[in-house]
């Protein structure tokens, strides 16, 4: 007589919390499917953020108010860019504030000109728009007060480049200088001025057109500090877009770290 194998015997009882585990797995699956359907899975959010941030933006032939422009720092050779958080674009609120960096755009055209990405494109808006009445064009000029606004290709509602006086709670991420960031608010903290780099000629150059590709200083009106970005490990930022450099403000930083130029299609 052969003894029946225990391995083939039917299981009539289950041990442990198998029912709870089964319910938990079922709940996790439903949650996964719901997030996949709504586009809120982590990988989907990341892909959407990268797609929106790196989409190509058309630059104009001429440097003008209200048109897309790239703002290049001559110290890092990187372009002013929005450092987007992981919550973008699904959970954007009017209270959000986004850091800015200088980033090297790897995509270039055949002639070597970088391709403008949405996160690295901005618009200049004159604060006193009535001051343009009677002028023949919309060319930015030295001494004019401006807003620096995010491209609407990145986010529909404009965000303004902001800065506030340095304090214990608000300072730049790396060098601990005065911080720069984007905000949905306008206000005095969002007012800037395009300044001629040579101090001895500033008064003489006021009112003269700013040429694309010419070095300028971007000065914060409230604090009179200069927007800048420094090359090197102390100011290095690692994010989803690669290795970039923090942007902050400092009084009379000197050298090329606070020198910028505006770039358009030509």
Image (cartoon, rainbow, N blue to C red):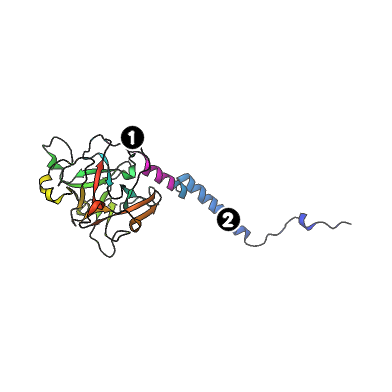
User: Which residue is label 1 attached to?
Assistant: 111
Can you say whether 103 is above or below 251 in the image? above
Assess disc 2: are there few (<14), some (14-19) or many (≥20) residues with their C-alpha within 10 Å of its C-alpha. few
- Assign the N terminus to one quadrant of the image: bottom right
Crowd tier of the residue under label 1, counting other residues whose Cα lies within 10 Å: few below 14, some 14–19, many 20 or above:
few
Pick out the residue farthest to the right.
Answer: 1
Q: Secondary structure at mark 1?
A: loop
x then y, percent, for residue 111:
33, 35
Residue 229, image x and y in percent? Answer: 28, 53
Task: Relative to 110, say whether 128 is above or below.
Answer: below
Answer left or right for 25 relative to 135.
Answer: right
Horizontal relation, residue 229 to residue 198: left or right: right
Which of the 4 quarters of the picture holds residue 235? bottom left
The quadrant in which the C terminus is found is: top left
Image point 63% across, 59% down: which residue? 18
**Residue sitting at x 20%, y 52%:** 219
Q: Nearer the viewer, residue 195 or 54?
A: 195
* Left or right of 206 on screen, residue 148: right
Please indicate, yes or no, whether residue 32 appears anywhere in the rendered image. Answer: yes
| Chain part drawn in magenta | 45-59
Principal SS element in the magenta part? helix
CA separation in Å, label 1 and label 2: 60 Å
Label at residue 23: 2
Q: On the picture, is 14 further left or further right than 136? A: right
Residue 159 in the image, given as x and y percentages of width and height:
28, 48
Q: Nearer the viewer, mark 1 or mark 2?
A: 1
Of the numbered discs 1 and 2, the one sitting upstream in the chain is: 2
Q: Nearer the viewer, residue 140 or 14?
A: 140
Residue 58 magenta-highlighted: yes
Q: Is residue 169 magenta?
A: no
Location of residue 63 in the rendering, given as x and y in whole percent from the top left corner: 22, 38
């Amino acid at each position: 007589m052969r003894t029946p194998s225990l391995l083939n015997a039917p299981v009539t009882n289950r041990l442990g919390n198998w029912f709870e585990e089964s319910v938990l797995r079922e709940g996790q699956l439903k949650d996964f499917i719901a997030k996949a359907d709504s586009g809120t899975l982590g990988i989907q959010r990341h892909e959407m953020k990268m797609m929106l941030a790196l989409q190509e933006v058309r630059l104009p032939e001429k440097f003008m108010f209200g048109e897309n422009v790239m703002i290049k720092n001559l110290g890092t050779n990187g372009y002013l860019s929005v450092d987007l958080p992981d919550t973008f674009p699904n959970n954007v609120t009017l209270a959000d504030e986004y850091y800015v960096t200088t980033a090297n755009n790897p995509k270039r055209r055949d002639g070597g000109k970088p391709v403008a990405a949405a996160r690295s494109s901005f618009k200049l808006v004159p604060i006193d728009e009535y001051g343009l009445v009677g002028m023949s064009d919309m060319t930015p000029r030295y001494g004019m007060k401006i807003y620096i606004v995010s491209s609407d290709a990145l986010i529909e509602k404009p965000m303004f480049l902001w800065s506030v006086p340095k304090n214990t709670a608000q300072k730049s991420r790396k060098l601990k200088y005065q911080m720069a960031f984007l905000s949905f608010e306008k206000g005095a903290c969002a007012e800037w001025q395009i300044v001629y780099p040579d101090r001895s000629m500033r008064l003489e150059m006021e009112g003269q057109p700013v040429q694309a590709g010419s070095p300028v200083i971007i000065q914060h009106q409230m604090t009179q500090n200069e927007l800048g970005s420094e090359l090197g490990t102390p100011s290095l930022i690692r994010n989803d877009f690669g290795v970039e450099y923090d942007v902050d403000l400092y009084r009379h930083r000197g050298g090329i770290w606070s020198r910028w130029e505006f770039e358009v299609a030509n």
